[in-house]
Amino acid sequence: MLFILAVHVSEIRGQTQWTHYFCSPVLEVGPSGAWDAAWVEPMSVLYDGSQYRLWYLSYAWDGEFIGAGSVLLIDDTFYLWFYGQNSAIQKSGIGLATSSDGMHWTEYENNPVYIPNDPGDWDDAAAGVSPCVLFDGERYHLWYEATNGQAAPGSQQPMWQIGCAFSDDGIVWTA
């Protein structure tokens, strides 16, 4: 489940310097028994012209997983690209949701918009973790974390790498 919290935690000065406010944490875990009682994870921060908005996530109680994502505000519409897992089809990938207010979201009916490549490719086991999307006014640029499940040299842990893809509409992606 995704929640939004509008919070002003830092100021941008020249887009290179940040002022730290000593009020951490800015978002604590929820009360005992709440969906976010165990942990909260920042997902995306966006300045909408008047305030900073922080989207965060926590445990998904429906047996599936929704992970970190990226939010953009384009022409009065919020776009959220997020990592998702579906155990029914044994795939993970990137989904898309839109919102007019940044709080009430509608998932794209043909999700996922990006899924792992063919068997044997570098991202065939899990693709789309921590997607970051930028829009340059003409084209969408996507960076994401992925793995084929193979261990990194000298390690027993899977080797995770960063991939990129491009799109003209934010839905159909070319790696």
Image: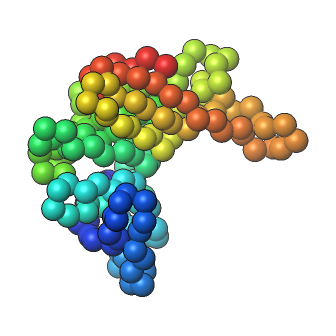
**Image: 20 above or below 60:** below
**Image: 150 above or below 79:** above
Q: Nearer the viewer, residue 113 or 60?
A: 113
Give the quadrant of residue 84. Answer: top left
Outermost right residue: 154
The residue depicted at 20 percent of the width and 64 percent of the height is 51
Give the quadrant of residue 171. Answer: top left
Give the quadrant of residue 123. Answer: top right
- Residue 131 lies, in percent from the top left, at 44, 40
Q: Nearer the viewer, residue 75 or 18?
A: 18
- What is the count of numbered marks? 0
Q: Nearer the viewer, residue 125 or 41?
A: 41
- Residue 130 lies, in percent from the top left, at 48, 44
Report the side of 20 relative to 172 (left or right).
right
The residue depicted at 43 percent of the width and 59 percent of the height is 16
The residue depicted at 55 percent of the width and 38 percent of the height is 145
Q: Is residue 88 visible?
A: no
Q: Is residue 147 visible?
A: yes
